[in-house]
Amino acid sequence: MADGITIAFGPLGPVGRGDVVLFVGDDLALAPAVAQAIGGGVADLVARAAASERFKGKSLSALALPAPAGLEADRLLVIGLGSEKDRAKIDWPALGGFTAGKVSGRSAGVALIAAGLDVTAANAADFALGARLRHYSFDRYKTKKKPEGEDAKGTALTLMVADVAAAEAAAKVSEAVADGVILARELINEPPNVLYPEEFARRAEALTALGVEVEVLGPGKLEALGMGALLAVAQGSTREARVVVMRWNGATDPNEAPIAFIGKGVCFDSGGISIKSAGGMEDMKGDMGGAACVVGTLHALASRKAKVNVVGAIGIVENMPDGNAMRPSDIVTSMSGQTIEIINTDAEGRLVLADVLWHIQSAYKPKFMIDLATLTGAIIVALGQDIAGMFSNDDALSAKITAAGEATGEAVWRMPLIPAYDKAIDSKFADMKNTGGRHGGAATAASFLKRYVNDVPWAHLDIAGVAMSSSASEINRSWGAGWGVRMLDRLVRDHYEA
């Protein structure tokens, strides 16, 4: 799915036309096998060029120089790995992304062997994953061609490794994860006139080709189930609501209780009657980032044939302000039977999630539930755009999510859930109101969701800051980040696969 880039693996050896990528630490030493394969004079050439250009081999720095006579390649690209301390904790996806950025639009033989490093097959696969993710761009609606030479020929990388077969096997897993991330990015980046609830559901149905069972619930079924909160959000739009339930049954025991991922899928959020200000409203096409992550995660797990049972569920709506839209002071009844006073129609995502959470825990009895939602601007105020907020009723689940986030660079920070936040959403006229006011907005929203979770271990990830328009990184230059796919895949791999 990463169009425009091809990645292959091969043994270390002579290279043809294109770039040759070499890696050095702060001592500027080439691995002996690399120096021998590329040519004895290359090490001296690198040392002289580094002195001239004041290149110190710092982590994620690069030095480009013409290939010497006798070497068929066009250019040498020397990439720094830093000090011995830096080399002990290399972020391999980031290194792959940095490298791909430096050779974009070219062919390159990447000597993925460095002095003092034992590069494993897993390292090589992570490098390839980072290169794929860095190369992704969303430009299908641009009608003008790029300037001559700008990625015109695509990017072709040959990763030269010690054990080709092992690297290729590991890369099949990383490619599945990369495709899942890219699918999530595609969904987030699409404009809302293209990706509305019915179309989103149709794209989720494409997972059936991977063996995922997909059920699409339309308005009639949702009404029969009693999903009054979700339907209230959708009633102001001409686009009908959908709930999509995706099931991957990969565990040895098909009757084993599944794990569950639930995503908020507001394809466009105008705020409804409590309409948002015009400035930045165009970003609200990304208010379905949680649902995109769930679909991308199911794609990744099914593609790599994960040995686990998983339910993925997404509530897909538009929040629009027509004459039939829900109003502040309306009272709606959720699937749980609990009533909700609408205070602000722009606090709609929690209404969607409330019904989907209730349905999944009732129908599928999961081991745990994790919901992901671009839920509040308050979490961006608290944590910025590099860390997601996590609220949970279970310490063990929280610890596992935190560890998976640290391992993948998709970090979470646990936030508090205390009785005062729950009290803030009590209503004079209904069981609860849909907002607790300005203060502690992310926490009162999480407390609202907690009322729709019984004894199931549960975590809520508020990804408003990280799902879209987040900080650029070595593996992401896209507006829609596809955040969470790598972290959830790692969580499953480390803890829940047989």
Image (tube, helix red, strand yellow):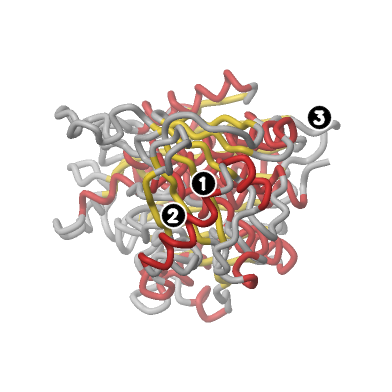
Distance CA(mark 3)–CA(mark 1): 34 Å
Residue wearing tag 1: 130
Residue 128 horizontal side relative to residue 49, left or right? right
Give residue 449's position: percent from left, percent from top.
53, 60
Crowd band around label 3 with a 10 angstrom C-alpha radius: few (<14), some (14–19), many (20+) = few
Residue wearing tag 3: 254
Residue 238 horizontal side relative to residue 332, left or right? left
Q: In which quarter of the image is residue 136?
A: top left
What's the amino acid at mark 2?
Glu
Which one is nearer the viewer's eye here, 67 or 160? 67
What's the amino acid at mark 3?
Pro
**Which one is in front in this view, the residue at disc 2 or the one at disc 3?**
2
Residue wearing tag 2: 474
| Residue at 26% over, 41% down | 236
Sooner in the amino-acid sequence: mark 3 or mark 1:
1
Give residue 38's position: percent from left, percent from top.
57, 41
